[in-house]
Image (cartoon, rainbow, N blue to C red):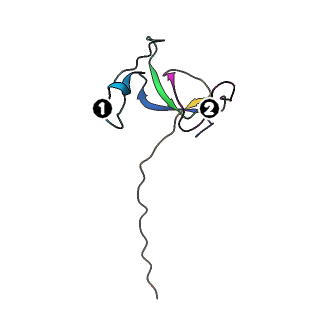
Amino acid sequence: MAGNVWEWCSDWYRPDYYRFSHRKNPQGPLISFDPSEPESPKRVQRGGSFLCTDQYCARYMPGGRGKSAADTGASHVGFRCVLPATPKPSRSYTKR
Protein backbone atom coordinates (compact mmCIF):
# COMPACT_ATOMS: atom_id res chain seq x y z
CA MET A 1 0.00 0.00 0.00
CA ALA A 2 2.90 2.38 0.59
CA GLY A 3 2.86 5.15 -1.96
CA ASN A 4 -0.57 4.38 -3.41
CA VAL A 5 -3.08 6.17 -1.20
CA TRP A 6 -3.42 7.17 2.42
CA GLU A 7 -5.23 4.24 4.02
CA TRP A 8 -8.10 5.09 6.34
CA CYS A 9 -8.22 3.19 9.61
CA SER A 10 -11.34 2.51 11.64
CA ASP A 11 -9.90 4.54 14.55
CA TRP A 12 -11.10 8.08 15.13
CA TYR A 13 -8.33 10.70 15.33
CA ARG A 14 -7.48 12.34 18.64
CA PRO A 15 -3.95 13.73 19.17
CA ASP A 16 -3.87 13.04 22.91
CA TYR A 17 -5.36 9.53 22.89
CA TYR A 18 -2.19 7.47 23.30
CA ARG A 19 -1.05 9.57 26.22
CA PHE A 20 -4.04 8.34 28.24
CA SER A 21 -4.34 4.82 26.84
CA HIS A 22 -2.97 2.03 29.03
CA ARG A 23 -3.23 -0.78 26.51
CA LYS A 24 -0.50 -1.74 24.08
CA ASN A 25 -2.81 -1.85 21.04
CA PRO A 26 -5.89 0.22 21.90
CA GLN A 27 -8.95 0.33 19.67
CA GLY A 28 -8.91 4.11 19.44
CA PRO A 29 -11.09 6.81 20.98
CA LEU A 30 -14.89 6.70 20.86
CA ILE A 31 -15.09 10.16 19.26
CA SER A 32 -12.83 12.28 17.10
CA PHE A 33 -11.35 15.56 18.21
CA ASP A 34 -8.86 17.71 16.30
CA PRO A 35 -8.07 20.99 18.12
CA SER A 36 -7.30 22.73 14.81
CA GLU A 37 -10.72 21.78 13.34
CA PRO A 38 -12.99 20.72 16.23
CA GLU A 39 -16.16 20.64 14.09
CA SER A 40 -14.73 18.12 11.58
CA PRO A 41 -14.63 14.43 12.63
CA LYS A 42 -11.39 12.80 11.46
CA ARG A 43 -10.08 9.26 10.97
CA VAL A 44 -6.52 8.04 11.40
CA GLN A 45 -4.64 7.43 8.15
CA ARG A 46 -1.57 5.32 7.47
CA GLY A 47 0.83 4.73 4.62
CA GLY A 48 1.15 7.89 2.52
CA SER A 49 0.02 8.62 -1.02
CA PHE A 50 1.29 8.97 -4.57
CA LEU A 51 1.09 12.76 -4.10
CA CYS A 52 3.80 12.77 -1.38
CA THR A 53 7.27 13.87 -2.46
CA ASP A 54 10.43 14.70 -0.56
CA GLN A 55 9.56 18.40 -0.89
CA TYR A 56 5.95 18.05 0.26
CA CYS A 57 5.81 15.20 2.81
CA ALA A 58 8.22 12.44 3.71
CA ARG A 59 5.57 10.07 5.05
CA TYR A 60 4.95 7.85 2.03
CA MET A 61 5.88 4.67 3.88
CA PRO A 62 4.00 2.03 5.91
CA GLY A 63 4.95 3.81 9.15
CA GLY A 64 3.50 7.14 7.99
CA ARG A 65 0.59 8.48 10.02
CA GLY A 66 -1.88 11.23 9.32
CA LYS A 67 -5.48 12.34 9.73
CA SER A 68 -8.30 13.24 7.39
CA ALA A 69 -11.92 14.34 7.54
CA ALA A 70 -14.20 11.32 7.41
CA ASP A 71 -16.17 12.82 4.52
CA THR A 72 -13.27 13.69 2.22
CA GLY A 73 -13.48 12.75 -1.43
CA ALA A 74 -9.76 13.14 -2.20
CA SER A 75 -8.34 10.83 -4.86
CA HIS A 76 -5.33 9.93 -2.73
CA VAL A 77 -7.28 8.51 0.24
CA GLY A 78 -8.69 5.00 0.34
CA PHE A 79 -9.14 1.89 2.42
CA ARG A 80 -8.33 -1.81 2.33
CA CYS A 81 -10.89 -4.56 2.67
CA VAL A 82 -9.76 -7.27 5.06
CA LEU A 83 -11.04 -10.82 5.12
CA PRO A 84 -10.09 -13.23 7.90
CA ALA A 85 -7.83 -16.02 6.68
CA THR A 86 -9.46 -19.43 6.50
CA PRO A 87 -7.41 -22.59 6.31
CA LYS A 88 -7.47 -24.43 3.00
CA PRO A 89 -9.02 -27.87 3.20
CA SER A 90 -6.35 -30.53 3.27
CA ARG A 91 -6.28 -33.09 0.50
CA SER A 92 -5.40 -36.63 1.27
CA TYR A 93 -3.76 -38.54 -1.51
CA THR A 94 -3.44 -42.28 -1.45
CA LYS A 95 -0.89 -44.24 -3.43
CA ARG A 96 -2.29 -46.90 -5.69
Q: Nearer the viewer, mark 1 or mark 2?
A: 1
| Category of crowding for the residue at label 1, using alpha-carbon neighbours closer than 10 angstroms: few (below 14), some (14–19), many (at least 20) | few
Residue indicated by mark 1: 22
Give percent across and percent down for residue 55: 69, 25
Residue indicated by mark 2: 49
| Category of crowding for the residue at label 2, using alpha-carbon neighbours closer than 10 angstroms: few (below 14), some (14–19), many (at least 20) | many
Horizontal placement of 88 versus 2: left or right? left
Horizontal placement of 57 versus 14: left or right? right
Counting residues from the start of the chain, the first of labels 1 and 2 encountered is: 1
Horizontal placement of 70 versus 50: left or right? left
Identity of the amino acid at label 2?
Ser
Residue ID at (46%, 25%)? 43
C-alpha span from label 1 to label 2: 31 Å
Q: Nearer the viewer, residue 43 or 21?
A: 21
| Residue 73 visible in the shown view | yes
Mark 2 falls on what kind of element?
A: loop
Please state the extent of the stretch shown in magenta in the rendering. 52-71
Identity of the amino acid at label 1?
His
Residue ID at (32%, 29%)? 21
Does the magenta segment cover residue 12? Answer: no
Give percent across and percent down for residue 13: 43, 23
Q: Nearer the viewer, residue 16 or 94?
A: 16
Is the residue 92 above or below the residue 33 in the image?
below
Dominant secondary structure of the residues highlighted in magenta in the image: loop
Please count the marks in the image: 2
Give percent across and percent down for residue 6: 56, 31
Horizontal placement of 29 versus 71: left or right? left
Q: Residue furthest left?
A: 22
Residue ID at (66%, 32%)? 50
Q: Residue furthest bottom?
A: 96
Question: Which of the 4 image quadrants contains residue 48?
Answer: top right
